[in-house]
Image: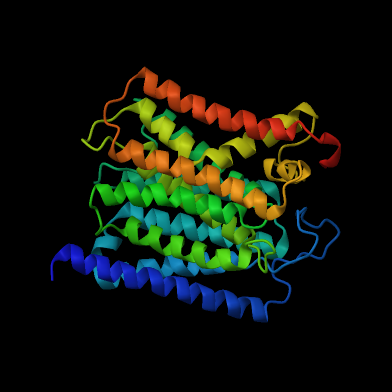
């Protein structure tokens, strides 16, 4: 049997196994959950749903990530993983993000503690990259000055972890969005045929967990992912987004900075638009951007007359289209000029204007 056939069979079995495993583990968690993630205190979390659900979906994400790590050591040489400082950094930072989110689900931690942990996660990724011998790093390589790259990397990690957390405000939205951020990363690794890569099996494992969780998270949801899920996902996609989107190259190996930025904007289009809209609107009302509310793009689409399921389909459509464009950028568009930049910027701005415009309607209904 040829190597690529062996890998296809192994990864197919692995993917299907993780999907069924997560369906089982979520069913068990749902059956035996009591109060984890359902806060009963003086300041309850502001959610769109009027019904409390167990916020335990993140547990299956993290377990799948750990299983991916273990399976990589089984399928390939185990010392490959532990000799790679970037893989260790990703494992460490993801674990820290998950534990912080789990603590927040259980005890409602302070915002400054969450921010501190998010900064530490970014620093861990930077240290892992600094001691790595590979060229594709977990540090955004946009500037000639390393300090600027470090600062941008930490701000990116903080921003995406909070964006994914903020976007988790309606059934299925964050799950769908995360799936279509992970897919371009998987496709990028695939076209470069780097299948014996820890990141590839980790992405497959988390993707399988998300697909299984969607069964419980679509409207009407039976389970929320909680901060344990959103913080883990935020760190995970922020880190691998750096490696395979921020630091992506053309199919022929050329580096085009404007194309890299466009790829990031398209892959992360919904978290960027939603968070930017919320921040602009809250600052204009002289409110803190860090306090929860029912003023996200998802909420305003609902105020506009769409059902929760229809809002999820709208986000699914935008995410899927943007991911398809990313696929085309990776594989088919090697010649890049200013017109290419302008064209894709227009697409991003059009999506932003459409969603932001909805937030200016029915303002009296938001809180």
Query: Between residues 358 and 185, which one lies in front from this camera angle?
Result: 358
Residue 83 lies in quadrant? bottom left
Q: Residue at x 74, y 29 (%)?
A: 283
How many numbered marks appear?
Answer: 0
**Residue found farthest to the left:** 1
Determine whether, in the image, residue 345 is placed left or right of residue 184.
right
The quadrant of the image that shows the C terminus is: top right
Query: Between residues 183 and 110, which one lies in front from this camera angle?
Result: 183
Determine whether, in the image, residue 89 is placed left or right of residue 157.
left
Determine whether, in the image, residue 169 is placed left or right of residue 26.
right
In this rendering, the answer to whether 323 lies above or below 233 is above
Q: Residue at x 40, y 57 (%)?
A: 203
Q: Position of residue 261 (x, y in %)?
A: 42, 31
Give the colouring mode of the picture.
Answer: rainbow
Q: Position of residue 237 (x, y in %)?
A: 47, 49
In this rendering, the answer to whether 190 lies above or below 321 is below
Question: Could you tell me if residue 351 is visible in this image?
Answer: yes
Q: Position of residue 262 (x, y in %)?
A: 43, 31
Q: Residue at x 54, y 42 (%)?
A: 318
Residue 352 lies in quadrant? top right
């Amino acid at each position: 049997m040829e190597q690529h056939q062996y890998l296809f069979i192994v990864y197919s079995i692995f993917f299907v196994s993780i999907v069924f495993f997560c369906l089982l583990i979520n069913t068990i968690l749902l059956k035996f959950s009591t109060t984890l993630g359902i806060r009963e205190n003086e300041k309850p979390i502001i959610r769109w749903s009027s019904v409390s659900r167990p916020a335990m979906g993140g547990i299956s994400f993290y377990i799948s990530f750990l299983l991916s790590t273990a399976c990589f050591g089984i399928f390939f040489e185990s010392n490959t993983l532990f000799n790679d400082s970037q893989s260790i950094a990703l494992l460490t930072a993801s674990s820290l993000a998950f534990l912080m989110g789990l603590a927040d689900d259980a005890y409602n931690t302070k915002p400054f503690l969450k921010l501190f942990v998010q900064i530490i996660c970014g620093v861990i990724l930077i240290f892992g990259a600094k001691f790595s011998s590979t060229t594709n790093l977990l540090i955004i390589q946009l500037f000639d000055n390393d300090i600027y790259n470090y600062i941008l990397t930490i701000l990116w990690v903080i921003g995406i972890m909070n964006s994914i957390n903020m976007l988790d405000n309606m059934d299925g939205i964050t799950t769908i969005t995360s799936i279509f951020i992970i897919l371009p990363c998987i496709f990028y690794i695939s076209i470069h045929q780097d299948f014996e890569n820890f990141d590839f099996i980790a992405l497959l494992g988390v993707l399988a967990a998300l697909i299984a969780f969607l069964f419980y998270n679509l409207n009407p949801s039976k389970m929320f992912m909680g901060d344990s899920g959103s913080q883990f996902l935020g760190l995970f996609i922020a880190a691998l987004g750096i490696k395979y989107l921020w630091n992506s190259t053309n199919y022929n190996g050329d580096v085009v900075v404007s194309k890299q930025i466009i790829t990031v904007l398209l892959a992360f289009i919904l978290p960027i638009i939603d968070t930017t809209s919320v921040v602009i609107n809250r600052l204009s009302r002289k409110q803190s951007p860090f306090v929860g509310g029912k003023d996200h793009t998802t909420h305003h689409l609902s105020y506009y007359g769409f059902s929760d399921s229809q809002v999820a389909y709208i986000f699914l459509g935008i995410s899927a289209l943007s991911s398809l464009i990313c696929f085309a950028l990776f594989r088919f568009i090697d010649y890049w000029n200013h017109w290419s930049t302008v064209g894709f910027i227009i697409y991003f701005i059009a999506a932003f204007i459409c969603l932001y415009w909805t937030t200016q309607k029915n303002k009296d209904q938001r809180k």
